Image (cartoon, rainbow, N blue to C red):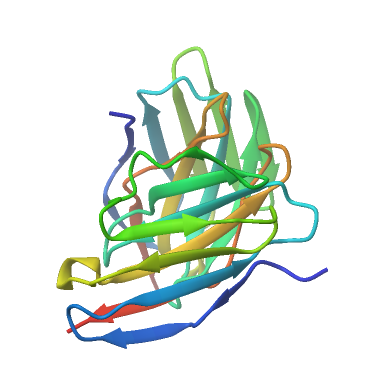
Amino acid sequence: EAGVTQSPRYAVLQEGQAVSFWCDPISGHDTLYWYQQPRDQGPQLLVYFRDEAVIDNSQLPSDRFSAVRPKGTNSTLKIQSAKQGDTATYLCASSFRGLQLYFGEGSKLTVL
Amino acid sequence: GDKVKQSPSALSLQEGTNSALRCNFSIAATTVQWFLQNPRGSLINLFYLVPGTKENGRLKSTFNSKESYSTLHIRDAQLEDSGTYFCAAFSNTDKVVFGTGTRLQVSP
């Protein structure tokens, strides 16, 4: 069975540029999470979905970050007008009915 | 806000010794998951727990929901146990909050 797939693995941007990260969860998993992990810190929840619905996006910096999961399967996290403070690894995880999380390998973002 | 505190923040062990890591929750956790993040950054699942205890080889984990804590015991530490250990607390809305991490270095 395929695990959680994320792309791209790496992205390097200048400040002010935009980037999108894509996540393909494990087939059949209804809950999908996006986390931001700055260097030497723990993962911090940005947003999570159950099927196509956003359950909690209170930690998403809404002015520049957006996330969608239109068909309840794949998801995209977009950062517009990136800042140096956005430098981090962006992790996607999925679960079935709130059971254990399975993580992808992450997308490492560097903003110069 | 929701907080999950881990202790210690860093730990050095010699091969063959034992240790315990702890997670304290300020949220009402229903389940807990422990991960090891390896030097490549991959999060490896160690345990997923309802209240109680699980054991897997040299690792054992306990989750006490009434007292809002979880522990991870490492027996006979090996070099490959090095990395950062995270606990994650699940709420009854499926929100999952990560702890601050424990960085473990095992030396010969």
Q: Quadrant of residue A87?
A: bottom left
The image quadrant where one finds the N terminus of chain B is: top left
Whether residue A73 is visible: yes
Q: Is residue A100 left or right of residue A54?
A: right
Q: Is residue A95 left or right of residue B106?
A: right
Is B69 rendered above or below residue A42?
A: above
Against B90, residue B104 (above or below) is below
User: Residue lying furthest top in this view?
Assistant: B66
Question: Vertically, is B14 above or below A12?
Answer: above
Q: Residue at x 53, y 21 (%)?
A: B64
Residue extending furthest toward the right? A1
Residue B16 visible, this orientation: no
Rendered view: A16 above or below B106:
below
**B43 or A58: which is nearer to us?**
A58
Place of residue A11 in the rendered image (x, y in percent of width and height, measured from the top left): 37, 85
Q: Position of residue A10 (x, y in %)?
A: 41, 85
Residue at the (52%, 27%) spot, across then down: B91
Residue appearing at x 57%, y 45% in the figure: A49
Picture mark count: 0
Q: Quadrant of the C terminus of chain B?
A: bottom left
Residue A18 coordinates in the image, percent (x, y) = 31, 77
Q: Position of residue B32 (x, y in %)?
A: 55, 35
Seen at 72% across and 37% down, the residue is A97
